[in-house]
Image (tube, rainbow, N blue to C red):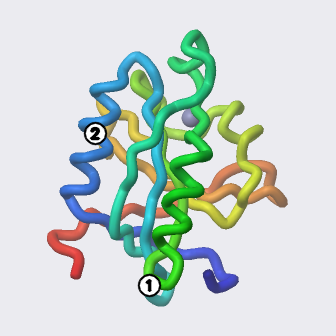
Amino acid sequence: MTTAAPTSIEMSPADLREILKLTRAASPDEACGLVVGRREGDTLIVTRVVEATNVVQPDDRPKRFEVDPETRIRLEKRLRGTPDELIGHWHSHPFGPPSPSARDLAQAYEPELIWLICAPDTSPPLTAWRADPKAGGFRPIPVLIAKEIS
Ligand SMILES: [Zn+2]
């Protein structure tokens, strides 16, 4: 991935629907997964969203998430030698807000990964963020829902 931060993210309506479906199915727990894509200029193009188990303790799942590390390892192996790469992860806030929590900030170990957050009852239901450790927070990135992604 190049050095400058992407200025927008493009994803298909089908991938947005998939995240919404998984979010509603997991509610009141947080759903989570990984995001695959590629960079084109200043834009990150999402080519696939992947479901993962939220591996935190069951009692914590309505408030926290952790993507199953096995899913990530398998996915990164599959992506080797393809034009696509792991560009980030997604998780849900079943009851909002559509912005990163203090817990999310504490978990932002990998500033190059994009965070997608799905809050199904807000508009828009999906927001994208990039951790900015120097600023001590997250910066929003606009999400464009494309008609079709080639
Ligand atoms: Zn969160």
Q: Residue at x 72, y 58 (%)?
A: 110
Give the residue number, with chain letter if any, for mark 1.
Answer: 83
- Residue 120 versus residue 69: which sits nearer the camera? 69
- Given residues 29 and 11, the one toward you in this image is 29
Q: Amino acid at mark 1?
A: Pro
How dense is the environment of label 1, judged by Cα within 10 Å: few (below 14), some, or many (20 and up)?
Answer: few
Which residue is rendered at x = 43% and y = 72% of the image? 37
SS at mark 2 in the image: helix
Q: Nearer the viewer, mark 2 or mark 1?
A: 1
Whether residue 43 can be seen here: no
Q: Quadrant of the N terminus?
A: bottom right
Q: Could you tell which of marks 2 and 1 lies nearer the N-terminus?
A: 2
Q: Amino acid at mark 2?
A: Leu
Residue 103 located left or right of residue 129: right
Quarter occupied by residue 40 = bottom left
Ligand 1 lies in quarter: top right
Between residue 43 and residue 30, name the one nearer to us: 30
Residue under label 2, please give it.
Answer: 20
Please state if 15 lies on the left or on the right of 53 as rendered.
left
Residue 38 can be seen in this image = yes
Most distant residue in the bottom direction: 41
| Residue 64, quarter of the rendered image | top right
Q: Is mark 2 within 8 Å of ligand 1?
A: no
Residue 68 position in % (x across, y down): 56, 40
x, y percentage for residue 100? 59, 39
Which numbered circle lies on residue 128?
A: none
